[in-house]
């Protein structure tokens, strides 16, 4: 809408319309804070634009960043007053009335409401600057010098004197203004955008193709060695800055901090880990990356050692720290921390012998700053315990302060928060029940009538230059390769037969070893399981729901008899259902551009058909 229309629209009505859009697109209700912001901040912006004579500038509200679910509060679209070329101003609106910098940082803030100092906020200028850079990185229209992109943060409830510490950060692509500097804000906008109608420029931005995001493993080595490949956004940068701060003060304090970073699939947990590995290593800090996943660690080593074999040694396993020197590392980054085991005991007391400490206690003891990155809904084995509450308990038993960061934005699944929420509701991991999928431009969800149909679809995507993989629930035996190296077709569905990915670390003709199934080209020829898919991403994902999870009547039923994973044999029915649903959540959220689903069970397939409107064309 134009700035004129924004000013004339009743704020309560506008907030209701945006809330309704949130329900339709994101399958969730707007939070109270969002409603307040829409009612209070948008009128403040509209008044500034009209006072600046920019009534005809187009205002894109809650603008969705390409290939992510990040949303800018507003993007102003029009032409530049000097060049006449398209000009865009990204606007971050804050209702803050007071803020100060977090000590020992330059880009984190505390608000008066953060009395316990547990939550840090990214500096508004740092936030909007990253939005501008991200738009340039991932929008075809802006991939050049002809289009002008700048950012502003407007703290319309604050006076300069109440945010003095924040005023020192200025940037070519980000400026901060308060109610004290409203006149300067008006002049700044007049210098960035002309009063002409901006509708065509807004349409050009909305219609611009998104440049696909780069896959994590393909640029992991470059990120660690020179740190130039990925852009940290919002809470990702908060997490990184908190770790850097904790490292800085760790040698000056008798107390150490534990940083816990939570986030769903594709929220950027591993990106945070790789950025920290590179930054800390380049600045002379001792840092090690650890996981409980053989596939994930092996793949990281494989990717990195192609450029620097020495760096590959920094990727370890959780089990490697059973007898580690206390605080021997500056930082230990525990990625995929939901896979931490109950090993070998359950005591977190620092006085208990090393062999009796829980694994989470061992990891906390190993570094001055332990960092845990996890998703509690990706626990897939009964002996895995990684959860924020259990890490908190172990840390507090050691007198450590814990700081939490929630990576609440979505970068995988084409940035489709709607698809992530759709999967959670489908599997009953959040309340509300399954809902029909509403097609959207950023992510494609299709139903396959047969596994042959799914396989053909994925092969076509791979042949077109994308990456594609097929996964399945662990419902068939997993055989060793034959003596001649050929794989056994363990997965049998009607007259369709395929093998699992290679069992173990041997390579076979046409197939990579197990840990490289998700990243090496030959992986398209085999079906992946939970242990080879977890932690990875590819453009196109196909998932076969096996007979271990079927829809009956009005809910899911899990069958232990249909499961071939021996690690789940002794679980009770409630835990089995929870773990099976978590496994399918992982498998269903590996795709960047789209997913295809198939179920071996006719009733379940019928339920999916009622929820997914599009099927793969025969």
Image (cartoon, grey):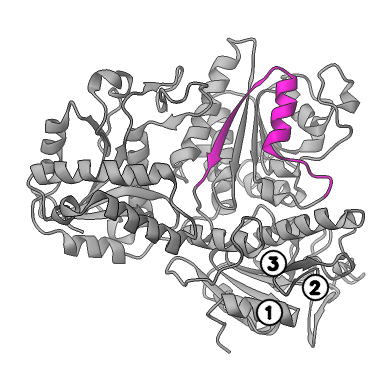
Relative to 573, 195 lies left or right = left
> Dot 3, crowdedness within 10 Å: few (<14), some or many (≥20)?
many
Q: Position of residue 270 (x, y in %)?
A: 59, 44
Nearest to the eye among marks 3 and 2: give it: 2
Q: What element carries label 1?
A: helix
Q: Where is residue 74 in the image (x, y as percent from the top left)?
A: 28, 49
Quarter of the view holding residue 138: bottom left
Residue 106 higher or lower than 533, as above or below: above
Q: In which quarter of the image is the N terminus?
A: bottom left
Q: Out of 534 and 584, give the one closest to the viewer.
A: 584
Residue 459, visible in the rendered structure: no
Which label's residue is closer to the chain start, 1 or 2? 2
| Pointer 1 with pointer 3, Cβ within 8 A | no
Relative to 265, 490 lies left or right = right
Mark 1 and mark 2: span between their CA atoms? 11 Å
Q: Residue 439 carries which label?
A: none
Q: Quadrant of the C terminus?
A: bottom right
Numbered range of the magenta stretch: 382-408
Quarter of the view holding residue 19: bottom left
Nearest to the eye among marks 1 and 3: give it: 1
Residue 141, visible in the rendered structure: yes
Residue located beneath label 1 in the image: 605
Residue 618 higher or lower than 566, as above or below: below
> Dot 1, crowdedness within 10 Å: few (<14), some or many (≥20)?
many
Q: Where is residue 328 in the image (x, y as percent from the top left)?
A: 72, 20
Q: Out of 209 and 341, give the one closest to the viewer.
A: 341
Q: Position of residue 346 (x, y in %)?
A: 86, 31
Relative to 567, 66 lies left or right = left
Residue located beneath label 3 in the image: 523
Q: Which mark is residue 547?
A: 2
Quarter of the view holding residue 395: top right
């Amino acid at each position: 809408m134009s700035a004129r229309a924004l000013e004339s629209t009743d704020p309560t009505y506008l907030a209701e319309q945006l809330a309704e859009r949130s329900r339709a697109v994101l399958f969730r209700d707007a939070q109270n804070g969002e409603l307040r912001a829409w009612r209070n901040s948008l009128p403040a912006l509209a008044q500034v634009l009209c006072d600046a004579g920019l009534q005809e500038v187009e205002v894109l509200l809650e603008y969705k960043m390409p290939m992510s679910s990040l949303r800018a509060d507003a993007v102003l679209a029009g032409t530049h007053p000097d060049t006449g070329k398209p000009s865009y101003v990204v606007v971050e609106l804050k209702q803050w009335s007071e803020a100060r910098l977090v000590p020992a940082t330059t880009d984190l803030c505390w608000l008066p409401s953060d009395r316990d100092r547990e939550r840090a906020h990214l500096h508004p200028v740092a936030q909007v600057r990253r939005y501008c850079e991200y738009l340039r990185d991932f929008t075809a229209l802006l991939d050049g010098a002809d289009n002008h992109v700048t950012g502003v943060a407007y703290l319309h409830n604050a006076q300069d004197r109440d945010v003095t510490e924040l005023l020192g950060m200025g940037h070519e692509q980000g400026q901060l203004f308060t109610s004290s500097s409203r006149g300067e804000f008006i002049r700044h906008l007049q210098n960035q955008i002309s009063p002409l109608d901006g509708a065509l420029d807004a349409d050009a931005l909305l219609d611009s193709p998104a440049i696909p995001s780069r896959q994590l493993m393909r640029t992991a080595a470059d990120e660690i060695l020179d740190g130039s490949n990925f852009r940290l956004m919002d809470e990702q940068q908060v997490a990184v800055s908190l770790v850097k701060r904790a490292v800085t003060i760790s040698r000056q304090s008798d107390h150490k901090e534990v940083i816990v970073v939570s986030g769903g699939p594709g929220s950027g947990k591993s990106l945070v880990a790789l950025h920290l590995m590179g930054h800390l290593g380049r600045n002379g800090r001792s840092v090690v990356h650890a996981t409980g996943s053989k596939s994930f660690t092996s793949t990281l080593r494989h990717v990195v050692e192609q450029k620097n074999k020495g760096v590959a040694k920094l990727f370890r396993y959780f089990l490697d720290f059973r007898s580690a020197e206390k605080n021997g590392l500056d930082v230990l980054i525990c990625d995929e921390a939901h896979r931490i085991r109950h090993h070998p005991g359950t005591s977190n007391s620092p006085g208990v012998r090393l062999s009796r400490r829980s694994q989470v206690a061992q990891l906390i003891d190993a570094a001055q700053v332990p960092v845990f990155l996890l998703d509690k809904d990706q626990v897939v084995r009964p002996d895995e315990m990684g959860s924020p509450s259990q890490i908190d308990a172990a840390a507090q038993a050691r007198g450590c302060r814990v700081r939490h960061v929630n990576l609440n934005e979505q970068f995988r699944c084409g940035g489709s928060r709607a698809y992530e929420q759709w999967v959670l509701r489908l599997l009953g991991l959040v309340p509300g029940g399954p809902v029909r999928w509403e097609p959207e431009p950023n992510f494609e969800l299709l139903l396959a009538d047969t596994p042959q149909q799914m396989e053909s679809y994925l092969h076509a995507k791979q042949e077109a230059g994308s990456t594609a993989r097929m996964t399945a629930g662990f419902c068939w035996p997993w055989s060793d390769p034959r003596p001649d190296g050929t794989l056994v077709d363990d997965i049998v569905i009607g007259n369709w037969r395929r093998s699992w990915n290679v069992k173990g670390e041997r390579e076979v003709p046409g197939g990579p070893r197990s840990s490289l199934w998700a990243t090496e080209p030959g992986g398209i020829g085999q079906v992946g399981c939970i242990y080879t898919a977890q932690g990875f991403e590819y453009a196109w994902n196909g998932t076969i729901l096996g007979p271990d999870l079927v829809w009956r009547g009005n809910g899911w039923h899990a069958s232990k008899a249909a499961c071939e994973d021996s690690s789940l044999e002794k679980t009770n029915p409630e835990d089995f259902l929870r773990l099976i649903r978590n496994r399918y959540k992982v498998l269903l959220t590996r795709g960047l551009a789209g997913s295809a689903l198939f179920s071996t069970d006719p009733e379940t397939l019928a339920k999916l058909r009622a929820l997914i409107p599009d099927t793969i064309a025969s």
